[in-house]
Amino acid sequence: MASTLLGKTLVIANPKARSGLAVAAIDYAKSFFAAHAGLTEACDFYMTKAIGDATVRCADASDFDTVVALGGDGIIHEVANGLMQIDRASRPALAIIPFGSGNDIARTWGVPFNDAEKALAHLASSAKHTIDVGRVNDEFFLETLSFGLDAAIALDTTDKRASGTIEKGEQLYVTSGIKYMASGSKGYACTFSLDGGPAQHIRSLIFAIQNGPTYGGGFRVCPKADPADGKLDICYNVKSPAIPVLLALFGLARFGKHAGSSAVAFARASHIEIEYEDPSVPCQADGERVEGSRFVVDLLPAELDIYR
């Protein structure tokens, strides 16, 4: 067993995160780990070059004690998907140096974001915890999964970041939200069941399944969601409100105050099955696109060790 906090450590970094500003964070991390030799047994760095690199590298990381993801929610999502391909007994712990636009995973874990110095100081004094992991079909997620109009907004923010937008975090999510909600979408017809219960039919404008409370840069869609409580939290619409009401609910969701509206309902479950009539329904997991029209969602309890 390693005598140091993180043991043998692999840092997987996305140099393109936050429009390239992550390069300075990577340099600082290299200096930090070199100067704090007692923090790790050994420390290797791997720079991603393309989407999916982190997942492939992490799937072969069973000889490490800890994998550190440096970048935004996208790279953390990729790292987690790679780690989940390793048997639980030999699966490395996950730590993060969050440097992105949304940083919702960091918000949930209480890790300082977009500041490598603070994030690394936090890591050096952190402790290991165990969290649940969500799975949709063959994709794993740590924070958020959503469908329909809600997912279209999240995916639009991803597309805008890829195109080099200067908008960041909450501002980016707000502009995408107004764009889609003001378009008068009638939603997506679907049938779903929770924990094997009776089928329910709705035309979903929002169908969010949360392992943590926020997405979109801090919108508290499921304010009570906890990644270590053995349940997924769900928020979905039970009415199709007029556009002005819909926009108002969107604003209230920033602070979790939409929970008082009769237009939405909340539930908790560990197994969800949902099927959409439209085979091209938008779906996202931690901001990454998921294809399909039928989705089986499960919570995998206590599947990942993290530093927070």
Image (cartoon, grey):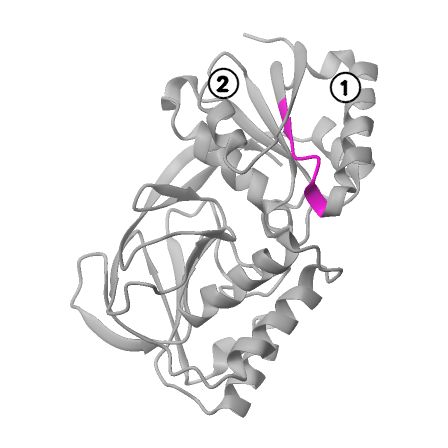
Which mark is on residue 33? Answer: 1
Q: Position of residue 48 (x, y in %)?
A: 61, 30
Q: CA distance from mark 2 to mark 1?
A: 19 Å
* 193 with respect to 38 (left or right): left
- SS of the residue at dot 2? loop
Which mark is on residue 61? Answer: 2
For this orientation, the residue located farthest to the front is: 163
* Residue 16 in magenta stretch: yes
User: In this rendering, does residue 288 appear at all?
Assistant: yes
- SS of the residue at dot 1? helix
Task: Quarter of the image for the N terminus: give it.
Answer: top right
| Circles 2 and 1: CB atoms closer than 8 Å | no
Q: Residues within 10 Å of mark 1 (few under 14, many from 20)?
A: some
When the figure is inspected, residue 229 is found, relative to residue 265, above or below; the finding is: above
* Residue 204 in magenta stretch: no
Q: Position of residue 59 (x, y in %)?
A: 44, 24
Under mark 1, the amino acid is Phe
- Total numbered badges shown on the rendered structure: 2
Q: Position of residue 105 (x, y in %)?
A: 58, 47
Q: Position of residue 295 (x, y in %)?
A: 28, 55
Under mark 2, the amino acid is Ala
Find the magenta span and give its range.
Answer: 11-18
